[in-house]
Image (cartoon, rainbow, N blue to C red):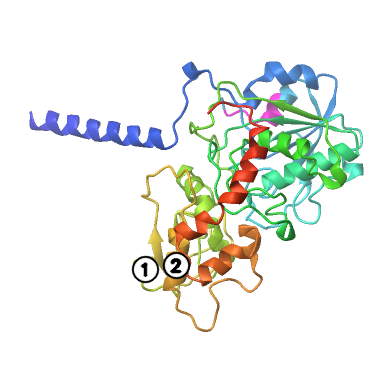
Amino acid sequence: MNLNFKIRTLVLICLIFLGVFNQYYSQTSDKDGFKTGADRAELYLPLLKNKTIGIVTNQTGLLNDKTHLVDFLVKNNIKIKTIFAPEHGFRGDADAGEKVKNGVDVKTGIPIVSLYGPNKKPKPEQLKGLDIVVFDIQDVGVRFYTYISTLTYLMEAGAENNVEIMVLDRPNPHDGYIDGPVLKKKWESFVGMHQVPVVYGLTIGEYGKMVNGEKWLKNGVQAKYTLIEMQNYHKKKRYSILDKPSPNLPNDKSINLYPSLCFFEGTQVSAGRGTDIPFQVYGSPWTKDLPYQFTPKPTSGAKDPFLNGKLCYGEDLSSYSKDLRELNLEWLIKAYKNYKNPEQDFFLKNLFFDKLAGSDELRKQIIAGKSEKEIKFSWKTDLDKFEKIRKKYIVYKD
């Protein structure tokens, strides 16, 4: 009797845990009829037949059965001339900012051309002979995550060289809401090319429509743009991701916290690169009043992490269970107030923080001691203006 009770208790705990987890980022079952763009082959295969194509993808370009899109297209006799690799590479194993090399895909023999480093925009000779370039990458819906910048350069090159761009759409884990400071034009860079908030509430396919429709490409050119929409996708649901979008976003929790914690990349505080839980912790050697301790060390996803080998004090957020639908500035402000190193400013000297934030305003507000509520109120006017633009390009229901 006692053993049976223990077994029932254990099963109950497991069921409760699974229920909480599924509320956090739920796996949509087949009966819901959800499909990514990649799983709607009946829509795109006829458009690719007898065409010569390029493809921009990485390890996330998977069908529901875990078949890679490149392998699926080859099996269906689609002629792929070139694979274009974004930041982190075709197989997704390069560090953030690490140079991605050209090469050949061992499995298919298809040449790989890097779209990271000095060659962020496909050159005319790299597009020569292509009818269509297919874009299929799992994005995370955050302005400074560079896959939307890669899509922008691809669309621009496609428009200039009369090559069609086809996007196979995928879920946005931060869909259905907008938040954060809107980027100012002066601070445009590869980690922020457009005047949008940190979280912009559009799938990558919708985002491409916006870039095209608002004529944000260089010289106002517009690409021939085809969107393969998802089936039965809802913007406020959360969908499981088949593979990690980059080495330091290994799971749903890191993705959930990423928009709030990535600001630390512009400071003297580690966001957990070089740990088992990147973007789930933060800390530095100079925030000793914070309780959690960790030491960044080289990992496969961070070969030389920031503050490598130094004991850091901060917070462990890996048990944070809330599905964030807003930016949390509490951790950033707390780290700033606890920072005690008279020899170094909290913010990095290259002011990369301003590029992430989209202007110097957030940095100045934190230095001035503004509260989270005051800072967020200052975003409202710009967010309201952006929302009017965003609404024009929404494809999916809430």
In the rendering, at what x and y percent does residue 378 appear? 55, 57
- Spatial CA distance of label 1 from label 2 is 8 Å
Dividing the picture into quarters, in which one does residue 396 lie?
top right
Residue at 48% from the left image edge and 47% from the top image edge:
326
Residue at 74% from the left image edge and 40% from the top image edge:
211
Report the front residue among 7 and 393. Answer: 393
Q: Is residue 41 above or below residue 265?
A: above
Q: Secondary structure at mark 1?
A: loop
Is residue 70 found inside the magenta-colored segment of the image?
yes
Q: Is residue 292 above or below residue 126?
A: below
Which residue type carries mark 1?
Leu
Residue 41 shows in this picture: yes
Q: What is the number of the mark on residue 290? A: 1
Q: What is the number of the mark on residue 335? A: 2
Name of the residue lying farthest toward the front: 381
In the rendering, at what x and y percent does residue 39 appear? 62, 23
**Quadrant holding the N terminus:** top left
Q: Look at discs 1 and 2 and give the one toward the viewer.
A: 2
In the rendering, at what x and y percent does residue 105 appear? 74, 39
Q: What is the number of the mark on residue 208? A: none
Report the front residue among 52 and 214. Answer: 214
Q: Secondary structure at mark 2?
A: helix
Which residue type carries mark 2?
Ala
What's drawn in magenta, residue-wise? 66-72
**Left or right of 57, for residue 235:** left
Residue at 72% from the left image edge and 22% from the top image edge:
75
Is residue 328 found inside the magenta-colored segment of the image?
no
Residue 109 shows in this picture: no
Q: Which mark is first along the chain, 2 or 1?
A: 1
Q: How many marks?
A: 2
Near mark 2 (Cα within 10 A), the count class, few <14, some 14-19 or many ≥20, is many
